[in-house]
């Protein structure tokens, strides 16, 4: 009868053969069923009755098996990665899952991370020139103090991502939603931001001279003591945006504010009042 129970479970679990956690569930379940079968036999039940009632005790097991299998496969796809100080030029990492991966001090020139889930990963002090991060999940990632020239972050998920003090010449952030990210003390004059939405982003002490943010949205963004000479916010939306010189004697910062183009922009009353006090040109601005 043990073989009959084994054959029954083999048929139920057949579709998930080789999934470690499912195999463990199967082994535990077989042990429980054998124990239940022995109890029923001890009560005087015949073989067929004991078998039937034993099987009835597990109910609908298929949904549980499916949940365990899906969880197991998801965990198996998550790569535990420590590739610090490695030569990984032109590597293919497209679509991988590598939570809290370590790529510190590595050569990643031209590598492809498109569509990857790199949540919590670190790329500090690495060469990431011309790397492709299009569509990647970069939540809580660190890209500080590294070379990112000509890298691509189109439609990437940038939540609490840190790009401070990095080389971003030629980097493209097309269509990205940028939330609570940091671009402090960074030269962004040759960085491309198109079709982006910025929420809680910090540009403090960065050089944004000549940037065009036309039609884009800024909520809770800091441009404190940033280089803003000739920046364009045409048709942009600005809410709770900070433009602070950090010094009442910073004449250069105030002169830069006067060169910003806010034509057709929409802003809240606080942002408007702040910029008006700095003598920005707000002649064609909508206040909400």
Image: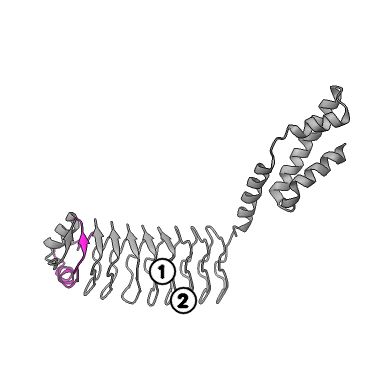
Name the image quarter holding residue 264: bottom left
Name the chief secondary structure element in magenta.
Answer: loop
Give the spatial CA distance, label 2 vs label 1.
13 Å
Q: Is residue 68 left or right of residue 224?
A: right
| Residue found at x 23% / y 65% | 225
Question: Which residues are drawn in magenta?
Answer: 242-268
Q: Which of 242 and 95 is in front in this view?
A: 95
Q: Earlier in the sequence, mark 2 or mark 1?
A: 2
Q: Is residue 86 left or right of residue 154?
A: right
Q: Is residue 25 left or right of residue 253?
A: right
Q: Position of residue 216 (x, y in %)?
A: 30, 65
Q: Position of residue 82 (x, y in %)?
A: 57, 63
| Residue found at x 21% / y 59% | 267
Read off the residue under disc 2: 129
Q: Position of residue 208 (x, y in %)?
A: 28, 71
Element at label 2: loop
| Residue found at x 32% / y 72% | 188
Numbered disc total:
2
Read off the residue under disc 1: 145
Task: Indicate whether residue 48 is drawn in magenta.
Answer: no
Dot 1 surroundings within 10 Å: few (below 14), some, or many (20 or more)?
A: some
Dot 2 surroundings within 10 Å: few (below 14), some, or many (20 or more)?
A: many
Task: Indicate whether residue 248 is drawn in magenta.
Answer: yes
| Residue found at x 35% / y 66% | 196
Name the image quarter holding residue 161: bottom left
Q: In this view, does 69 lie to the left or right of 126?
A: right
Quadrant where the image shows the N terminus: top right
Name the image colouring.
Answer: one colour
Element at label 1: loop
Q: Which of marks 2 and 1 is in front?
A: 2
């Amino acid at each position: 009868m043990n073989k009959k129970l084994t054959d029954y479970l083999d048929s139920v679990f057949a579709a998930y053969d080789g999934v470690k956690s499912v195999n463990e569930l199967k082994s535990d379940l077989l042990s429980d069923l054998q124990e239940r079968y022995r109890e029923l036999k001890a009560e005087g039940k015949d073989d067929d009755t004991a078998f039937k009632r034993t099987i009835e005790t597990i109910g609908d097991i298929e949904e549980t098996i499916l949940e365990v299998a899906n969880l197991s496969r998801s965990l198996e796809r998550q790569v535990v990665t420590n590739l610090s100080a490695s030569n990984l030029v032109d590597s293919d990492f497209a679509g991988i899952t590598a939570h809290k991966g370590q790529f510190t001090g590595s050569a990643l020139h031209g590598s492809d991370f498109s569509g990857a889930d790199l949540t919590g990963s670190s790329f500090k002090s690495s060469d990431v020139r011309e790397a492709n991060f299009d569509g990647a999940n970069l939540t809580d990632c660190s890209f500080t103090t590294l070379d990112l020239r000509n890298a691509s972050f189109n439609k990437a998920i940038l939540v609490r991502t840190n790009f401070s003090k990095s080389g971003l010449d030629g980097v493209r952030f097309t269509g990205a939603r940028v939330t609570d990210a940091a671009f402090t003390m960074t030269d962004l004059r040759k960085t491309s931001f198109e079709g982006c939405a910025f929420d809680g982003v910090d540009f403090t002490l960065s050089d944004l001279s000549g940037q065009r943010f036309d039609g884009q949205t800024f909520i809770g963004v800091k441009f404190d003591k940033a280089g803003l000479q000739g920046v364009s916010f045409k048709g942009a939306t600005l809410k709770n945006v900070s433009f602070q010189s950090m010094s009442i004697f910073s004449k250069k910062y105030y002169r830069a504010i006067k060169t910003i183009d806010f034509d057709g922009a929409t802003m809240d009353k606080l942002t408007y009042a702040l910029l008006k006090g700095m003598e920005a040109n707000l002649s064609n601005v909508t206040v909400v």
